[in-house]
Image: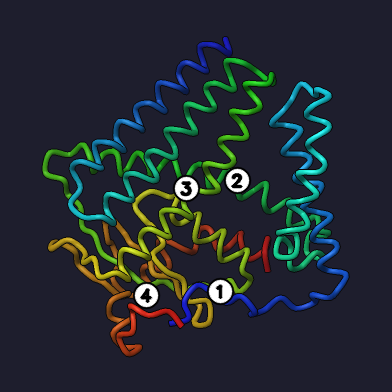
Amino acid sequence: MRFARGGGRGAPGVSAGGGMKSRLILFVLGLAVWAVLTWPPTARACLFGPPASLLAALLAGEMFVRRPYALKDPMRYAYFALYLPLFVWECVKGNIHVARLICHPDLPINPGIVKVRTRLKSETGLAFLDCSITLTPGTMTVDTDPDGGFIYVHWIDVKAVDVDGATRRIVDIFERILVRIFE
Amino acid sequence: MNEILGMASIVVGLAFELFGCLGLVRLPDVYNRLQAATKCVTLGTCGIMFGVFLTFGPTAAGLKALLCIFFVVLTAPVSAHAIARAAHRSGVRLCPGSVVDRYEEDMAARGGDSGSAG
C-alpha cells in the first residue's frame, strides 16, 4: 500500500533556491514562536532563541515549504481569514451535535467508514482538509489516498453511504475555500 | 468584564471535556471513542485556554495559552488520524452496529496486503 505517503510526489518548482527560502521562513517563524513563548524578553531567552531556531531550520527546513511562491499571493491569506471563522463555527456546531448524541440515553449512533472524493492535490491542502474533517466532530479521517483523490472518513452518524452524498455533506463546505488557499 | 467572559469560556470548555470523557466511556468501539476523545476534548481544552487568555490578557501567561491552542489544534487531529489508521491496519473491526466500511472494502480489493507497508 502506498497510502498517505507521497513523499516525492508533486512539488513543482522546487529548486536549490527553494530549500534555502524554506529554511529562512522556518527560521523566522521559529523565532516568532520563541518570542511569544518567552514573552517578556530576557537576556537568556534572546541568547537561546536564535540558535534553537537555526538548528530547527537546518534540520527540518527543507520540507517545510515546498512552494515558496504560493506564499506571495495575498488572496490566499484573505481566503484563509475567511476559512477560520467558518471552521470554528462548524467545529462548535458539530461538537454540540456529538455531545447530544453522547448524552442521549439510547446512544443513537450510526457509525461507519465512508469514502469521499477531493479535488485537492497539494500536500498542505490535503493535510488541512484531513485535519479539518477530523476536528469537525462526527467525522474523522482514517486514511488518505492522494493518488486517487479519496479520503476515508469515519462518521459517527452516517447519513449517506455513497461517495457523492458523503462528499457533499463532509467535504464540500471546506473544500470550496481550501481550493483557493492551497492550489 | 474580561474575567467574567474568561470564566464563562472555562466553564464551557470544562463541559465539553466532560462530554468527551462520557463519550469515552459510553461509545462502543475504538473509532467512536477516538471521536469523542479527540474532538470534544480539543474544543474543551481550547475553551479553557481561551478563558485563561481572556482572564490574563496579553501577558506572559495569556500568550502562552494562545500558543497552546495553536499547537493543540495542530497536533490533536494528526494523532487521532494516526491512531485510527494504525487501529484499522492492525485489524481492529468496527463495532457490530456499523453500517458501512469502505476502507475495508478497498483494502480487500487492492489485494488485502493491509498489514505490510510498501
Q: Which structural element holds mark 4?
A: helix
CA separation, marks 3 and 1?
Answer: 24 Å
Which residue matches tag 4? A163
> Which quadrant holds residue B100?
bottom left
The label on residue A84 is 2
Question: Residue type at mark 1?
Answer: Arg
Question: Can you say whether B22 is above or below A30 in the image?
Answer: above
Measured as percent of width and height from the top left, residue A78 is found at 73, 51
Q: Which sits in the foreground, A182 or A79?
A: A182
Q: Identify the subunit bearing mark 1.
A: A
Which residue matches tag 3? B76
CA separation, marks 4 and 2?
Answer: 26 Å
| Tag 3 and tag 1 share a subunit | no
Q: Callout 3: few (<14), some (14-19), or many (20+) C-alpha neighbours within 10 Å?
A: some
Which residue matches tag 1? A119
Q: Which structural element holds mark 3?
A: helix
The label on residue A43 is none
CA separation, marks 4 and 1?
Answer: 13 Å
> How is colour applied across the structure in the image?
rainbow
Q: Callout 4: few (<14), some (14-19), or many (20+) C-alpha neighbours within 10 Å?
A: some
